[in-house]
Amino acid sequence: MNKPAKNLFEKVSIPVEAASFMSAVNPSRRRVDLDNFAFVAFDLPEYSRNGLGKAIGRVVRYMPHGRVSELLKIQGAVCIAAIFGSDTTREHILYQDMNPKLLALSQQALIEFLPASAQRYLSANGWALDMQALAGAYLVANGLTVDRDEDIEGFAAKVLQYPLQAHYLESNPLRTLLDNETGCVVDWKKVL
């Protein structure tokens, strides 16, 4: 059984039988190891192609064990990112070729990425803390700046769309897979 972390940076994980990952882990790709519950940005072709920028997720760190682990060549942690802000997620195993970038270990740290003027604007407009955190994550993940009030309003409108668009991509895995193979782009005006 895992002991509570001594600090936020200590790696903790959820022990799980390796057979649980039998069909999911690709042993030919290099996995990354991140802190449990860390916020991470990573590349998903369907996100960038459809104007969402980087995918933003929250990590759950699993540690496979058992005889099947050796058979499947699953050594070390398996980090899965659940899309932040989406009601539904496909739970993405994080690999190095997805260019994962650790953003923060807490929602408060994500909010602190926002300029003070953006924090005031979002608070004044009734944004919940988790949405403010998503705004901070989106800002940093996509290398954006919001210095002027008109930038903040446009940025806020884009961040409000992110959970809806992410939910659509995450809750339609077959459509997303086919769109990835054909290069199709979602017509957000028809979908949302």
Image (cartoon, rainbow, N blue to C red):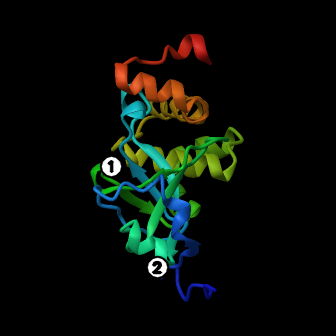
Residue type, numbered disc 1: Met
- Report x, y in % for residue 155: 48, 33
- Report x, y in % for residue 35: 47, 71
Which SS class for mark 2?
Answer: loop
Closer-to-camera residue (99/154): 99
Q: Is residue 129 above or below residue 78?
A: above
Where's the N terminus, which quadrant? Answer: bottom right
Which SS class for mark 1?
Answer: helix
Q: Which mark is residue 116?
A: none
Q: Residue furthest top?
A: 190
Contact? badges 2 and 1 (CB < 8 Å): no
- Report x, y in % for residue 181: 36, 25
Residue type, numbered disc 2: Phe
Work out whether residue 114 can be spotted. no
Which residue bears the numbered disc 1?
98
Work out whether residue 4 can be spotted. yes
Q: Which mark is residue 9?
A: 2
The residue lying at 59 percent from left, 41 percent from top is 121
